Amino acid sequence: MTTASKTDEVLNELDLLASASRSADTLMAQVVKLLHQRMLKYNWVGFYMIEKSTASGQAPVLVLGHFEGAMTPHTRIPLNQGICGAAASSGKTVVVDDVHSDSRYLACSIETKSEIVVPVFVHGKVVGELDIDSHFPAAFSSEDRQLVEHCAALVGKQLEKSSA
Ligand code: SME
């Protein structure tokens, strides 16, 4: 199977999951599982969500949610730290082809070579993100970026439904 048809197949499965999903939490668990199982270069797949109830005056923090892959030491990431913090604070997808040449990188596994982080929006506001690490350098092509952005958008829509 070509990479393109594999990606299309995974996209179809994701759309089916999203249309049948009753909660954003379940959908996030299903998304990380599917991506981790089916996309062979996606070695760690997880959501970080911005903590809702921080005490007044405290900076917002990204908190690890559903994930597949080895446990990471980074379960709470301030918005001014890491590639994760950069994506959440800018509201933009960040693709890093070589994590070791990026000074923002917070190491999760010594095997990680490249990373993509895509923000999740609810009514135009960043509420979290989908983070994927690969053991392969430059693993995330524009096709991967579209796939991961699609996943983040599906979760954003489901969160909007739940908060309606
Ligand atoms: N590498 C991320 C930290 C999260 S772990 O990869 C799971 C970062 O630089 O923000």
Image: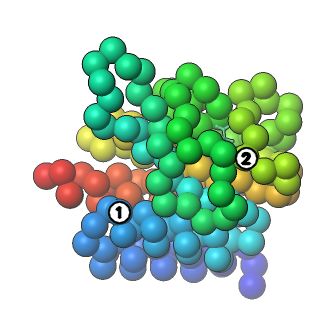
Q: Is mark 2 within 8 Å of ligand 1?
A: yes
Mark 1 burial class by Cα count in 10 Å: few <14, some 14-19, many 20+? some
Examine the rendering and report whether any part of residue 91 can be seen: no
Residue under numbered circle 1: 25
Q: Residue at x 55, y 34 (%)?
A: 77
Amino acid type, callout 1: Asp
The image quadrant in which ligand 1 is located:
top right
| CA distance for labels 1 and 2 | 23 Å
Against 30, residue 144 (above or below) is: above
On the image, the x and y values in percent for residue 56 come to: 28, 19
Residue under numbered circle 2: 108
Residue 97, numbered circle: none
On the image, the x and y values in percent for residue 146 come to: 57, 55
Against 125, residue 13 (above or below) is: below
Q: Quadrant of residue 153?
A: bottom left
Against 72, residue 18 (above or below) is: below
For marks 1 and 2, the one nearer the N-term is 1
Q: Helix, strand, or loop for circle 2?
A: loop
Nearer to the camera, 58 or 157 = 58
Q: Helix, strand, or loop for circle 1?
A: helix
